[in-house]
Image (cartoon, rainbow, N blue to C red):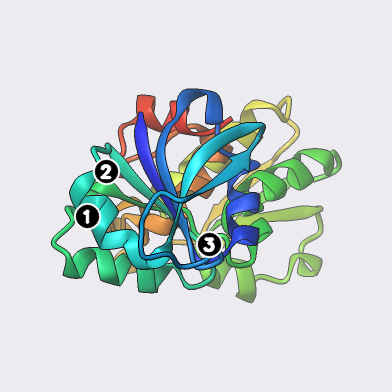
Amino acid sequence: MRVIIAATSNSSLEKLTEKLNMDNLDVAVVLSPDCPFTEEPGQYSITIDKRTYDYFPIEYLDYCTKNIHYDYILVCGSNSWYIIGELKKSGIDRRKIVNLIVTEYCYSFLRPSVLLRKIKQQTDAKILITGLSYARDAVNTHCYSLPAVVFAGSDQDLFYDFCGAKEILGQAGGRYKYVLIGIAPYSFHWDVSLSERELIPAYYLAFKDAHNYHVPKDEMKSLFR
């Protein structure tokens, strides 16, 4: 997979590459505002995971996308929407853009994985609650006579509710007595992989399923460690 990496800072780039499988990526060029601007592109290089790549100022984003062959543009950083906006202005196919946002890095990339691990560690739980923000924020687990845990969030849909419940229950050895699913009318029409695409890498890391995301499952598998 040949990629261009566009980061809003080198710190964002460093956090991103902790999760990327650099062995599977052919990195054409790395762009960052931390690279000193030069009138002649290609004068700098950057070392990531003991590999050296061409390093361009972010101002050369349009130049690189028009002059370099690539399969995807990996965008990361707290202001990734600015970069994505510039790419769209240049007419870049949105299916070529993968937003690997690292704002609140642990939340964006690791939240489902961390939550799954915490729930699996609560071996006394008898009630599993899934759903959207209503289930996450409005349910008081202390009101139940049995111990309850919540796998729910505002950035979740029925598909990933099912993925989470399937994995949790599959490893629970039958100890759960009840599963509560928080459903709203729009739940049946909301697909996170189509509407909030920047969240899908987090769910892929947890469940190895990108659902309807525009990057095929086998390519997602090669992208991450």
Quarter holding residue 125: top right
Circle 2 residue: 214
Q: Position of residue 87 (x, y in %)?
A: 25, 63
Q: Amino acid at mark 3?
A: Cys
Q: Residue 215 at what x, y percent from top left? A: 31, 39
Tag 1 and tag 2, C-beta contact below 8 Å: yes
Mark toward the start of the polypeptide (1 vs 2): 1
Q: Using the numbered discs, state the Cα–Cα distance from disc 3 to disc 2 in whole angstroms.
A: 30 Å
Q: Which residue is mark 3?
A: 35
* Disc 1 crowd, CA 10 A, few/some/many (<14, 14-19, 20+): few
Relative side of 187 to 87, left or right = right
Query: Which residue appears at 25% of the width and 61% of the height?
Result: 62
- Rendered image quadrant of residue 72: top left
Spatial CA distance of label 1 from label 2 is: 9 Å
Instruction: Check residue 94 in the rendering and tell me which mark sits there, or answer none.
Output: 1
Q: Residue at x 54, y 70 (%)?
A: 78
